[in-house]
Amino acid sequence: MHRPPARRIGILAGGKSLPIEIAESLKSRGVPVHVVALEGEAGEEIERFSPTWVNWGQIGKIIASFKKAECSRIVIAGSVKRPDLATVQPDMGLFRALPTVLRLIRVGGDDAILRGVIEYLQTFDLQIIGVSEIAPELLLPVGRFAGPSERFTDLTDVGLGFGVLEALAPFDVGQAVIVSGGKVVAIEAAEGTDRMLERMTKLRHKQLRAKQPVARGFLVKAPKAGQDLRVDLPAIGPDTVRAVAAGDLNGIAVEGGRVLALERGTMSSLAETHRISIIGFERDDPRLQLSSPNEGCDAPRADYSVRILGQRKMPDWAKADAFKGANVIAASDRFGVGKVAIVARRHVLAVEAGEGVEAAISRAASVRQWGNGFWSRRVGVAVVAAGRDLSREVVAQVADAGLAGIAVVLRKFAASVSADVVAEAERRRLFVVGLE
């Protein structure tokens, strides 16, 4: 019986190997593809699929290219960096979509933005599909994939890691944490997994040079609850294994069937060489003893009582950032982390995980959303868990990071904010408030 030819599938390609692996998987099954590649993101290797190259601002060209190729089903794949809006080259399609674009920038975290992008593309009869639908073989399954089997102490770290991810999922924080010796040592936020691993490695090497004891541990990675898996599946690959080995961790734990494994042949070989365990777990694996994400912490609050601590008032637009940061701190507290959370336009830029308030603020300054040159005003709030952690030096860092102000979670028996700190904030044109 004659089968009709497979309909062409469109690929909007970002960086790394995923778009190429999807295209190769489809072509091996006789499914034609049309690739639209993002400039500054997709690599030169995508050229063998004769892509149409576009700038982030060429929304009209993206849609027109898929339409011309008669693609009704689109997969969005590959790593992307949030663009600096000062460098975007717009076309008429972007101007038509401008109300949607501005709404997405204001609306909040990455999940909300991606949902908005899907909804917008679907208005042009473009159906967004997920990798699991067209290339399920790229997902890492449940069970040991490579490297040594897990040990009992590893299971403790992995269970804690999944617990942190579940607790922070409602706030769209990140997809990965590092747990070492029963302690959370890094939480991914806007920086991404690679940079989180890099800073963790630098910190561990510094500790070793100081002859401090350093436990090994696990990178734990999983999608966030409620996340749209069509466009934002977490992924690991050879670079992840190299970074985990450099940080002297025992392995990588993921939620089996819900995390992509890129360049799996190379990744497996590296894992065996460096004795790095790569294991897919089910969330309800009884060995992990995963506690409830709400255990021991209050439900997220939509509103707080705001106490002005200086002369400068908190703008209304900053309240959502401050309240979200306070909720992140409340969720993090039971894991012994979260001295500060930095939030800008509802995007969580950084969550402190043992490195200290100043280091977390410094990290957030390097991952400002949508480009440093686009916004002329200060945006974002550093939410500090206790007044004792707020010093004149921290205030200076907040100002240098381009944030608008500081919110301190006021708790019973917590140290209050000193007058000289408030005065320093006033001098630097920052608001200081307490959240009760």
Image (cartoon, rainbow, N blue to C red):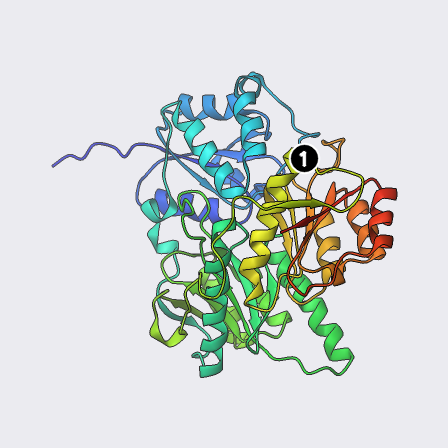
- The kind of secondary structure element at disc 1 is loop
Locate residue 188 relative to residue 399 in the image: left or right.
Answer: left
Relative depth, front residue between 306 and 102 = 306
Q: Position of residue 41 (x, y in %)?
A: 59, 41
Q: Is residue 110 above or below residue 8?
A: below
Relative depth, front residue between 374 and 141 = 374
Locate residue 250 relative to residue 21 in the image: left or right.
Answer: right
Relative depth, front residue between 412 and 402 = 412
Dot 1, how many residues are within 10 Å of its Cα: few (below 14), some (14-19), or many (20+)?
some
Query: Exactly how many numbered labels are in the figure?
Result: 1
Residue at 56%, 61% (x, y): give it.
332
Residue at 40%, 43% (x, y): give it.
230
Amino acid of disc 1: Asp
Q: Position of residue 422 (x, y in %)?
A: 82, 49
Q: Position of residue 73 (x, y in %)?
A: 35, 33
Residue at 50%, 26% (x, y): give it.
62
Q: Position of residue 63 (x, y in %)?
A: 46, 24
* Circle 1 residue: 84
Return the residue found at the far left: 1
Q: Quadrant of the N terminus?
A: top left
Q: Is residue 379 visible?
A: yes
Q: Is residue 188 visible?
A: no
Instruction: Say which quarter of the image contains residue 355.
Output: bottom right
Q: Is residue 35 above or below residue 329?
A: above
